[in-house]
Image: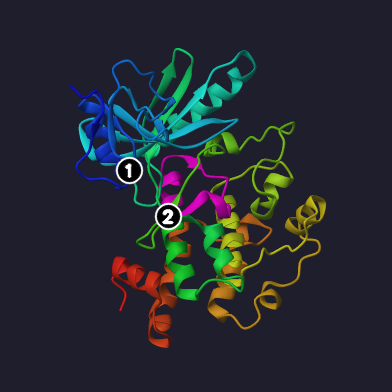
C-alpha cells in the first residue's frame, strides 16, 4: 500500500474548497507535486516538508465550524489564515488568531471588542462581515469575510494624478453606504484611510478594520487624556482638539479621502505631524478651490462642505453627501467612455 498518493491532476493550484475537501478526507495535498499526504499524525497549522518533493506544505486544521486551509500573513499582531465554512466550501473567509501572553492581555480585549462591534454591523455589501469570534485556551480568534482585491492606496499608486472622477464617485457612494450602516448602529467609524478600503474585482469598495470604532454617545464625552488616534491626514479637527465627535466627524474624514482620490495627493502635503494638525485646525490651509483647480466645480463644492472646520457647516449625514454626488453622475456618463472598473460600477448602480 502506498502511504502517499499522487493526485491525477498534477501542477494545479488548489482552491480553498479543494483544500477543505482534502482535509475532510484526511489528507493535505502538496501544491508543488500534488501528492496527497495523510494528516492523522500531523500537527495542525504547521509546515512540513513534502515526503515526495520536499516542498513545504501547510497542515490545515479546524476551528469550530471553520476549516483553516492556508496561511495568508503573520506578524506581531498574530496570524491570518484563509479558511472556508465546514458546511459550505464555497464560503471563503479570513481567520485571524492571536496568542495570549501576559503582556498583551489588553490587546486581546481590544481584539475581541473590535470583533464584537463587527458582528453588530451585520451583513452589508460595503462592510467587512464578522461571522464569529471567541476566546481560545491560548488566545482569541475572529472569522471575517474574505475581501479579495486591492487597497485604495494601491489603486492610487497606479494613478498618481488622481482617479477617474466617475470611478471616485462610485467608490465614494460605496464608502458612504458602509459608513451610514455603521452610524445607524450607533457607532462612528473614525479610521478612514487609504489602507482600510479594499476595491474588489467588481469595482465595489469595502471598509475594513473596526479597531477605532466608538459609540456615538461615548464620542460625545472625549477623554482629554487619550491620544489622537487615526491616520493624521484624515482626522477631524474636533479629535485634534479632543472635542465631541459625531457623524459629521466621519464626513470630514471622508471629504479628505475624496480629495485624495480626485487629485492623487493628500490635502496637506506636509509630512510633519504638527503642520498637518495645524492644517486641520484652520491654519496653513489654502482654499479647496485653489487645491482642486480644473476639477468639476460641483465636486469642489462637495469636498469643501465635507471638510469645513465647523461641524455645523458640514453635511449632516452620509445620505446628504450621496445625494449630491448622485446628481453629478449623469453628466459624467455623457462626457466620457468608461474604463473597465467604471463599466462594472455603472452596471451595479444601473447608471446609463
* Label 1 environment density (alpha carbons within 10 Å; few <14, some 14–19, many ≥20): some
In the rendered image, which residue does mark 2 sit on? 149
Numbered marks: total: 2
Residue sitting nearer the eye, 90 or 221:
90
Quarter occupied by the C terminus: bottom left
What colouring does the structure picture have?
rainbow
Q: Nearer the viewer, mark 2 or mark 1?
A: 2
Left/right of residue 291 with respect to residue 125 in the rendered view: right
Q: Secondary structure at mark 2?
A: loop
Q: Residue at x 76, y 52 (%)?
A: 277
> Residue 161 magenta-drawn?
no
Q: Secondary structure at mark 1?
A: loop
> Does the residue at mark 2 contact the one at mark 1 (Cβ under 8 Å)?
no
Quarter occupied by the N terminus: top left
> Residue 191 magenta-drawn?
yes
Determine whether 72 is above or below 124 in the image. above
**CA–CA distance in space, label 2 to label 1:** 19 Å
In the rendered image, which residue does mark 1 sit on? 123
Q: Residue at x 22, y 27 (%)?
A: 24
Give the residues in magenta: 177-199
* Label 2 environment density (alpha carbons within 10 Å; few <14, some 14–19, many ≥20): some
Could you say where residue 309 lies in the image, as x and y percent from the top left? 69, 58
Residue sitting nearer the eye, 175 or 315:
175
Could you say where residue 53 lies in the image, as x and y percent from the top left? 38, 35
Left/right of residue 34 with respect to residue 205 in the rendered view: left
Could you say where residue 90 lies in the image, as x and y percent from the top left? 23, 42
Amino acid at each position: 500500500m502506498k502511504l502517499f498518493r499522487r493526485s491525477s491532476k498534477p501542477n494545479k493550484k488548489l482552491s480553498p474548497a479543494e483544500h477543505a475537501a482534502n482535509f475532510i478526507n484526511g489528507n493535505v495535498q502538496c501544491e508543488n507535486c500534488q501528492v496527497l499526504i495523510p494528516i492523522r499524525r500531523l500537527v495542525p497549522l504547521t509546515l512540513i516538508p513534502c515526503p515526495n518533493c520536499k516542498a513545504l506544505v501547510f497542515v490545515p486544521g479546524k476551528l469550530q465550524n471553520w476549516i483553516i486551509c492556508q496561511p495568508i500573513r503573520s506578524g506581531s499582531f498574530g496570524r491570518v489564515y484563509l479558511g472556508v465554512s465546514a458546511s459550505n466550501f464555497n464560503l471563503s473567509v479570513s481567520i485571524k488568531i492571536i496568542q495570549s501572553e501576559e503582556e498583551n492581555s489588553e490587546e486581546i480585549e481590544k481584539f475581541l471588542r473590535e470583533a464584537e462591534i463587527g458582528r453588530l454591523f451585520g451583513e452589508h455589501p460595503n462592510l467587512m462581515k464578522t461571522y464569529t469570534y471567541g476566546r481560545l485556551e491560548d488566545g482569541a480568534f475572529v472569522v471575517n469575510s474574505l475581501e479579495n482585491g486591492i487597497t485604495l492606496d494601491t489603486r492610487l499608486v497606479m494613478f498618481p494624478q488622481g482617479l477617474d472622477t466617475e470611478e471616485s464617485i462610485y467608490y465614494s457612494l460605496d464608502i458612504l453606504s458602509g459608513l451610514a450602516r455603521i452610524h445607524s448602529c450607533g457607532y462612528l467609524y473614525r479610521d478612514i484611510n487609504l489602507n482600510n478600503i479594499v476595491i474588489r474585482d467588481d469595482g465595489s469598495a469595502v471598509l475594513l478594520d473596526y479597531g477605532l470604532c466608538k459609540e456615538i454617545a461615548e464620542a460625545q464625552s472625549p477623554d482629554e487624556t487619550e491620544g489622537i488616534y487615526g491616520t493624521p491626514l484624515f482626522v477631524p479637527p474636533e479629535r485634534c482638539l479632543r472635542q465631541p465627535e459625531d457623524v459629521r466627524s466621519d464626513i470630514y474624514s471622508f471629504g479628505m479621502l475624496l480629495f485624495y482620490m480626485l487629485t492623487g495627493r493628500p490635502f496637506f502635503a506636509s509630512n510633519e505631524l504638527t503642520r498637518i494638525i495645524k492644517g486641520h485646525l484652520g491654519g496653513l490651509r489654502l482654499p479647496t478651490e485653489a487645491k482642486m483647480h480644473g476639477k468639476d466645480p460641483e465636486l469642489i463644492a462637495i469636498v469643501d462642505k465635507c471638510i469645513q472646520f465647523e461641524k455645523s457647516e458640514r453635511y449632516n449625514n452620509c445620505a446628504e453627501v450621496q445625494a449630491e454626488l448622485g446628481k453629478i453622475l449623469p453628466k459624467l456618463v455623457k462626457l466620457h467612455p468608461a474604463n473597465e472598473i467604471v463599466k462594472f460600477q455603472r452596471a451595479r448602480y444601473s447608471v446609463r
